[in-house]
Image (spheres, rainbow, N blue to C red):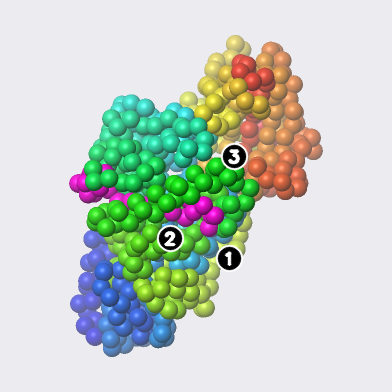
Amino acid sequence: MYRHNRPVRRLALMTALLLGAGQASVVAMASDTQALLIRDAMVFDGTGRDAYPASVLVEDGRIAAIGDDLVAPKGARVVNARGQALLPGLFDLHTHWTPNAVPSELPQVANLYMAAGVTTVSDFHEPPEAYAPRRQWLASIAAPDVKFAARMSTPLGHGADWGDENTTRWVNTPESARAGVQAVAAYKPDFIKAFTDGWRYSNAADNSSMDEETLGALVDEAHKHGLKVFTHTVMVKRGKAAARAGVDVIAHSVQDGPVDAELIELMRTHGTAYAPSLAVYLPERVDGSGRTGAKPDVLRQREHNFANALGNVKALHDAGIPVVVGTDAGMTGTPHGSSTLRELELLVDAGLTPSEALVAGTAHSAKALGVEDRGTLEVGKRADLLLVKGQPWTRIGDIRNTQQVYVAGRQVHGKGAVLPAGNRALALPAQPVDALVDDFERGDGRTALDTLRIDEADGGNDRTVQVTEVVARETGGNALATQAKLSSKDNAFAAAILPLSRGSVAPVDARSHRGIRFELRGSSPELRLEVRALGNRRFTAALQAQPQWRTVEVPFTALQGQPPYRAKSPVAEWKGDDLQQLAFSAGGEPGSKVWFEIDNVTFY
């Protein structure tokens, strides 16, 4: 056996216990893994120490020993890493696993991050209802450790200009902020993302911004619940308000001008870290698409903002403010995985050394996220490891030469990796769906399928205002009523959505049914039913509105396939085993008022 076997084992066990219940499932998952000895690597441990030659032993998903003459335990796998660099797994603290990106499927996105050596990821995109089913899905495949952010903004603020309050909580007073935190805390998010700054980079009309008193109450309440707060903050003055409020991470570049001494001192005093997400602001985009079709004035503004962003990273870093890695990946032109590596290169372009950029993407990011069981290569730490060819602490571009990646001691990428079949899947297996979708008799806002009803309207600052609520019917029982004042734009709408599975994560199989039946009345000149399926596939049927109740049957054969949202792909073809939502929507003349009511929605 290797030297000092018993003390190292005891230390690793004690460390795992001290890490708390929050990591128990990870430790348990890794407990049956084969011991691993990575021999003769150049170790960059993320602690600030220069790279040094050593071997690393992993047992039970954690680093058991680091030394020169380690002996592999019986049955251990041995990896000869001579000529390769061994680093802690990388972080990306700002991503969006959005259905509008390519790829959009959870396993495929996970694969991209693992291939890039990213072993801990923060997802800013999911509604709280989706946390549990997505966590369950992630636990069934090989994946980075994904942390979920609960989203909070102001009414019509950035992040709230396209989602309802079940996606992004709207707050604009200290009282509403505290209530909002308490509401989302019930879903056990990993942290909170607050959209505090409405500036749109001089390229579009600004959104509303969160006042400092509201933000301060949000942060205070979040910290009482053990939740860190990240903010969307892009202006110097808003950065000062965020720091004074005690936010943990500013998750965007401050880019309307140079940071000043006051902002630096506030961030230092309140312990605020900085995740500049340079990748999403790169004028030419990570995927090279940024200059294509951009208006000259828009491109000039992007270049001006990006120059400020680069300069501010250097100024904050030199002042001792922790710089961490986040990319906004999933947004336009910012692909998953590769954007994280580009972010490290951009930090070097901003003036950090390659070694400092790596520490930003490992140890500093782990501390900012509050997961200090990883981020460095030390005995007792979780074995999130990255083997690459080269010396990325000298040449940051070498970080792209990924050879092998390990998450909690399990190899997830590179020669020798064997992934579960679920990593090749595009969706969870479809489950049969009950005939009754909703009769609106529950008093907790949930459907008969135990899913949370949500609203949807056209997005932007000029946005449809709608109220959807359960109302009593004259003949007894309840119905769902939607009333709305449409925005002044063309194609304005208001919709009530009935998810067919929790968080609309898993698809359902309706092939044992022939169509959808419901009761309807309303005043809208444009009513329609939309069935939404995996891959942004949509199927619609126009509905006739009248003030009296009537029963409507829509056979699946009457649904018309539509192109994917914001795409020019061919129209969707009906399958029936990939359904996610039923959406009832109303439209009409810009600025007009519309209403409709539905009841007893079933498959027949």
Quick check: is 514 in the magenta stretch? no
Q: Check disc 1 and report its element: helix, strand or loop.
A: helix
What is the spatial separation of the Cα atoms under label 2 and label 1, in whole angstroms? 35 Å
Residue extending farthest top = 474
Indicate the amino acid at tag 1: Ala
Q: Position of residue 296 (x, y in %)?
A: 58, 45
Q: Are marks 2 and 1 in contact (CB under 8 Å)?
A: no
Q: Which mark is residue 500?
A: 3
Indicate the amino acid at tag 2: Leu
Identity of the residue drawn at 61% across and 12% down: 475
* Dot 1 crowding, Cα within 10 Å, few <14, some 14–19, many 20+: few
Identity of the residue drawn at 24% across and 56% down: 320
Q: Earlier in the sequence, mark 2 or mark 1?
A: 2
Quadrant of image for the N terminus: bottom left
Kindly tell me whether residue 219 is visible in this rendering.
no
* Dot 2 crowding, Cα within 10 Å, few <14, some 14–19, many 20+: many
* Dot 3 crowding, Cα within 10 Å, few <14, some 14–19, many 20+: many
Identity of the residue drawn at 60% across and 11% down: 474
Indicate the amino acid at tag 3: Leu
Kindly tell me whether residue 44 is visible in this rendering.
yes
Q: Check disc 2 and report its element: helix, strand or loop.
A: helix
Q: Earlier in the sequence, mark 3 or mark 2?
A: 2
Q: To which residue does mark 1 refer?
A: 421
Q: Position of residue 332 (x, y in %)?
A: 56, 49
Q: To which residue does mark 2 refer?
A: 346
427 or 271: which is nearer to us?
A: 271
Quick check: is 266 in the magenta stretch? yes
Q: Which residues are magenta?
A: 263-286
Answer with the quarter of the image where residue 224 lies. Answer: top left
Quadrant of image for the C terminus: top right
